Amino acid sequence: MTFQDDLLRHAEQIKQRIPHVHGEEATKQALVVPFLQVLGFDVYDPREVRPEYIADFAKKKSNGQMEKIDYAILLGGEPVLFFECKAVDAHLDDHDTQLARYFNATPSVKIAVITNGARLKVFGDLQQPNIMDPTPWLDVDLLGPKPTDIDALKRFRKLDFSASDVLALAEEMVYFNALVPFLSTQLREPTESFVRFVAGELGVAGRVTQKVVERLTPIFRKAVQAAVVDHVARSFDRPVAASEPPAAARVPSPAPTAPAKGATGASSVASTGTPAAGDASEARAGVVTTPEELRCFNLISSWVHEVVPAGPIAFRDSKTYFTIHQANVRKWFVRLNVTKTPYWVSVRGVAPEEARRLAPGLEVVDGGQFGDSRAVLASIDELQKLRVLLIAAYDRETRRVADDTESGSDEPALTN
């Protein structure tokens, strides 16, 4: 079972236990301790997990008791990670003062967590060494962790934990999370300072006056749109791997209930090259890639690249369904029909039970010949509800291919 599977199973346990958890101590035992076990720590070994950790500098509280951190994770005899716990119904935004005092006075600790069992906030010392940052670099909803959260939490596992690696990830996430909205805003409504910077870099406008900025701003918007369209178009033109079988051999017979696209005309296909045989050409005849299918592909592609910026993704169309895959069509992870109702999206590598958890609010059934799970959509707009599921399917396909490569096995022909 993978870490992702363990974490999602833990999320289900949290949901089941929350109604029965009252107070901080119950939160620790029912929610936080199991989470530490998911990370691979031996919660029964005080050499590894030290509950009620008291440092030499600890102060006495008004009731005469010493200040304590709920859990200190020790490696090599030194604390490297602090966990401060609050009751499951407590808000975490006003409870990090004590955590900061312990963090700032313990040089060996570079990562500190405050959690109520259902949510956790992770702090580092990115701004100033040995001084806990005032804002967390990671804020995770454990009831429904996003793929990016799961990937980040993998770094906290006992076997993988390295404070320097975690801080490197923290720095990357801080910059990435700041850059994405900034660039998105600049691409839609560029600020004057940004346009001035671009104009200065181009060196074609001479002195960049206010009049030049006003003239360049709409041109900048159009140029950005053209560049994005060109980038997407070039990604469609990636050649198919030489090992890819003919299209006729790849496309299974449609199920009786599956809607046929049935359109005629030239096909618009990503990641396709010269047909391997004459029957492949016949199989491709009459395929038209619709604007709705391209809209879905662009949306799914943007979600994937938020998580895996350089991740390969392309599509291949057929009369029955639209396939989205990685390096070649053997590595597919999504099939969909958005041309005739009922609309549906099928994924590979995620069983229906898990798919229902990752796509709440949608009807999810067994995928049958179209994949492992299939979600029924009332409209294309409901594709947004599948974001987490589709990214998970992409990740599963990446790991499946990696596992096949490591074991030396040939990649199997498509059977779904």
Image: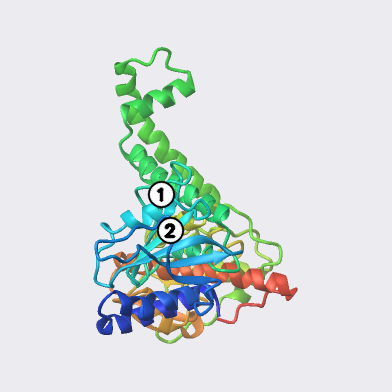
Query: What residue type is disc 2 on?
Result: Ala
Q: Position of residue 46 (x, y in %)?
A: 52, 74
Q: Position of residue 309 (x, y in %)?
A: 51, 52
Percent x, y for residue 149?
Answer: 44, 63
Q: Amino acid at mark 1?
A: Met
Q: Is residue 246 visible?
A: no
Instruction: Identify which residue, 68 or 16, lies in the foreground.
Output: 68
Q: Quarter-wise, where is residue 112 in the image?
A: bottom left
Count of labels in the image: 2
Res. 103 image quadrant: bottom left
Q: Secondary structure at mark 1?
A: loop
Crowd band around label 2 with a 10 angstrom C-alpha radius: few (<14), some (14–19), many (20+): many
Tell me the number on the disc at residue 132: 1
User: In the picture, which quadrant includes the N terminus?
Assistant: bottom right
Question: In this rendering, is residue 228 above or below 411?
Answer: above
Colour convention of the picture:
rainbow
Quadrant where the C terminus is found in the figure = bottom right
Q: Residue furthest front?
A: 64
Tell me where residue 178 sits by quadrant: top left
**Residues at circles 1 and 2 in contact by the CB criterion of under 8 Å:** yes
Name the N-terminal-most of marks 1 and 2. 2
Tag 2 residue: 112
Secondary structure at badge 2 equals strand
Asked if residue 172 is positioned above or below residue 269 in the image, the reply reads: above
Query: Is residue 6 shown above or below 85?
Result: below
- Horizontally, residue 245 falls left or right of residue 98, namely right
Mark 1 and mark 2: Cα distance apart in space: 8 Å
Residue 183: mark in rendering: none
Look at 54% across and 50% down and name the residue there. 168
